[in-house]
Every structure is written in C-alpha cells, then in structure tokens.
Image (spheres, coloured by chain):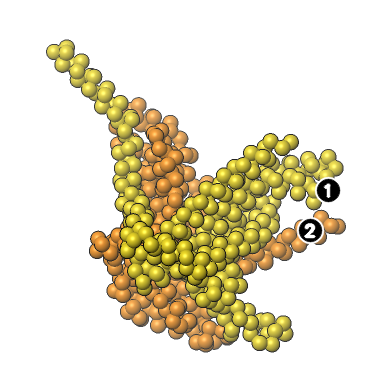
Chain colours: A yellow, B orange
Amino acid sequence: MTAARETGARSATRAARFAARHGWLLVLLPGGLFLLIFFCYPLVTMAVRSLTDPGPQNYTEVATSPVFRQVLVTTLKTAGLTTLVCLALAYPYAYRMSRASARTTTVMMALVLLPFWSSLLVRTFSWTVLLQDTGLINKMLMALGVVDQPLQLIRTSLGVEVGMVHILLPYMVLPLYTAMRRIDPMLVPAAQSLGARPSRAFARVTVPLSMPGVYAGAVLVFVLSLGFYVTPSLLGGPKNTMLGEVIATQVTRFGFGIGSALGMVLLVVTLVTLGALTLLGRAGSLARERTP
Amino acid sequence: MRPVLAKSLLGLLSLLIGLFLILPTLFVVPMSFNGSSSLGLPTRNWTTHWYTTVFTSSQWGEAAWTSVQVGILTVLLATSLGTLIAVALARGTFRGRGVLQALVLSPMIIPVVVVAIGTYMNFVAWGLTGSVLGLALAHTVLALPFVVVAVSAAARQLDQTYELAAASLGARPRTVFRRITLPLLAPGVVAGALFAFVTSWDEVVVALFLSSPDVRTMPVLMWTQVRSQVSPELAAVGTLLVAVSMLSVVGLHLLRKDQNA
C-alpha cells in the first residue's frame, strides 16, 4: 500500500516536472511545426533545386553571366542610395517629431503610419500616374516653365528611387524616432549651459545618442530594398532591373533552377549584410561607450 | 535669430516630408472620382462611374471575395498560432528561446520573393496553388511576426498576480489561460489580428505566384491590369484597398486609446 502510494506520488512529481520543463514545448508545437513546414522547408526546397535542377552548374551560369552581375550591381547600388536618401529625409523629420507637442507628434506619426500600413502596390501605382509624361509632376514643371518637354521620369532609375524612398521612409523614421525619444531632454540644455552653441550641442549630444536608431533604420531599409520587386518593375526600365524581378521572371518563364540559384544569392546577400551591419553596429556602440 | 530661423526651416522641411509621405498615398482617391479617363490632372468633372464599373464587374467581385476569404483564414491561423508563440516567448524559460524568436520574426526581413518561389515550388508539388487555403497558409507565414510582436507586448505588460491568484484558488493551468490570461491579452490579440488581416489584404508577391486565373486576390488582379493599361478603374480599386487598410489602422488606434483611458 505505502509502496504504491509512494510510487504514485513519485510519478506525479515526475509528471509535474515534465510539464514544467516541457510545457512550453507543447505550447510551441503548433506554431513551430507550421514555421518548419511553410517557412523553413520552402527555403530548403529552393536550396536543393538550385543545386539539382539540372545541377550545380546553375551557379556557374549565374557567376559568369554579365547580365546577372549587372543586375546584382544595380540592386546593391539602388539599395545603398535608397538607404542614404531615406536617412537624409527621416533624420530631420524624426528629430522634429521627437521635440514636438503631443498633438503635433500624433499628426506626424499618423503621416508615417498611414502610408506604412497602406498597400505598396497602390502607392506604386500612384507614382506611375504621377510620374508619367502627362502626369501631375510633368504638367506642373511645364506650367512653371521649368521644362518645355515632359521629362522622362517613369522607367528610369530616378523613378525607382522616388518610389522606393517613398515606401521605405517609414522604416527609417520609426527606429530613429524611438532612439531620439530615449535621449534625456536635459542633456542639450546642459551642454549649452556649459557654453556649447546649439549646433555644437546638436552635433556632440543628439547625433551620437541617436546612432542606435540610425543603425537600426539603415540596416532595415537596406535589407528590405535588396528584395524589392513590385516597385522597380512598375517604375523602372530594362536598365534598372533588380534581383527580385529577375528571380520572378526566371521562375515563371524559364524554370526553377536558375531562379532558385539567384534566390539563394539574394538570401545569402541579405543574411550576410544583416550579420555584417549588426556586428558593425555593435562595434560602433562599443567604441562610443569607451571614448570619454 | 539664427536658432529661430533653423527651427522654422526644420518645420518647413518636416512638413514637406510629411506631404511626400501622405499625398501619393491618398492620390488614388481624387483620381478614382475623376471624370476624364486619361488619368492626367484631376478635372472638375467628378463621377462615381469607375466605382460602378468595379462593383458590377464579375472579375473584381470574385477577386474581392477571394481576398476576403484569404484574409479571414489568415487571421484565424496567424492569430491562434502567433498568440501561443508570443505567450511562450514572453513567459517561457527554455533553451533556444532566442533562436525561436529570430525564426518567427525573420519573415519580416527575408526577401518576400525568396519565400514566394520556395513556397510556390512546394505548393505545385502538393497541389496547393490556385487555392484559398494555399494563399492563406503562405500569408500566415508573413503575418505571424506582426501577431507575435503585438501579443508579446501585451504579455509583457500583463500582471502575473491575477494568474497566481486564480491558480491559488484552485484553477488548473488550462483554466487560468482561458479565463484569466487570454482575456487580459485580448487587446494585443485583436491588434495582432488586424495586422494579420492588413498583411494578407495588401500582399502581392506571394499571391502572384500562388494565384490562378480562377482564384486570385484583388492586388493580383490589380497588378496584372496595371502592367497592361492604367485606367481610373484601378484608382477606384486602389482607393478601396487603401480604405480597408486605413480603417483597420484607425480602428487599432482607437482601441489603444480606449485601453489607455
């Protein structure tokens, strides 16, 4: 009797311990399985296809083709330029927002969040209409007498750039704003009371302390730019083709092999950039902490 | 004088950047009521003709119905899976927590084209292309991070005292989750559900690969038409798409306000 009760108690404790240790595993099981099947496995399929359909020579073709090299260069250049322009526009905006009254902040935030949550396709569509030869922008330029002939704005790298900056700007503003809100508002007056002019206080206090936001925003915008497909294919011309478009065209028209190999290139470039920039950001913040 | 000048310059610059963000987003609205069919400058002839065309067209009707079905199914899948993951991430102490978090959030960063072609190749083999279920499964992957972020935020703010109180009164863990934790998480779950819906509603790239001429979402149909001709009818569709997204976001804002009040 006693032995049986002891065994029962022991197994109950064991069960409780199992639940404590593995309970979270049970909770995670459905979501984890889902991600494995519908997110990880597709990436594996793509990797396998890139090596077997028809064989590893897919990579030789990708590496030796001047067309694909050109596309990769265009993609990296476009992503870099988009990041710089977004930073230049988002910095003053986020700075102004971080020092605005509650009501102004709400309005400025709405101007960022409403586009952020609106269809990328619709926003790109608007730009195709605005930038076309008979569009609002050319009509205005001609009415103002800036140009006589409509400017070629659509199907150019300028068109792609305008559209991508418009779409990615919120991704830069949000982390910058978060970083700037964290800055102690008394630091700038403190610097000024010690004799620093406003511009110097800004350069020596605000800018360094906003750097985490700059890194976060820049990494996000650059990495997201790399995979862009809809915007460059509607606003760009044949010379501005980006990697995302080539991958889609390959897979839909020419079969899975080369498309998968290019997909792997895009995936690896994205992950490497992400890793490198994150490390760089960490090194940067370390260096800043150590300099007095 | 100079700081004042700098301040007004900064204000002007911010205003221009704000207009650059919002005007092109809302440009489809005047375009969709424009009487001229050329889509140039907005004229004074206002019309609702383009909406009549869209609402009476069978292909737009079918696409809208597909979008709604896919959206709702995505919300159900992403919200239930995402809530469980978020609770485990916020509360659980287990090995591989960091890896799991990175895995769940990575669909936000991994290029959508890459996810799209991998999924497409699998779904061709499994016979899931051209189906509402296939579209919803793929959209759930993209929507999960938003649900997890929204629910995790709510879970971290949740006061564990309530759960301990319920447990001390004899409620079993399952009951505590259902009667205490879930109701307290509700605002986060609703926010996540709205994010999931908007993600699915606006998504083009994955949907482009998984759609068929019979089963395609509104953005996919819009995409095929934008490439051939630019008509005010598309501006009407665009306005409808943006209106639904914006209603969701405004709803979310009101929800948050309600919570804080």
| Identity of the residue drawn at 57% across and 44% down | A279
Query: Which residue is at the front of the view, A215 or A24?
Result: A215
Residue A35: x and y, percent? 35, 50
Residue B216: x and y, percent? 34, 71
Q: Amino acid at mark 1?
A: Arg
Count of marks placed on residues? 2
Residue B220: x and y, percent? 39, 71
Query: Which residue is at the front of the view, A258 or A184?
Result: A258
| Identity of the residue drawn at 17% across and 12% down | A2
- Residue B203 in view here: no
Query: Which residue is at the front of the view, B2 or A31?
Result: A31
Left/right placement of residue A280 relative to residue A262 reads right
Where is residue A9, by image quadrant?
top left
Rounded to the nearest whole Å, what is the CA distance between mark 1 and mark 2?
Answer: 13 Å
Residue B6's disc is 2
Q: Which residue does the numbered mark 1 point to in the structure image?
A: A197
Judge the density around disc 2: few (<14), some (14-19), many (≥20) Cα neighbours within 10 Å: few
Tell me: residue A80, above or below residue B168.
below
Left/right placement of residue A191 relative to residue B31 reads right
- Residue A253 in view here: yes
Q: Amino acid at mark 2?
A: Ala
Which of pointers 1 and 2 indicates the residue nearer the eye? 1
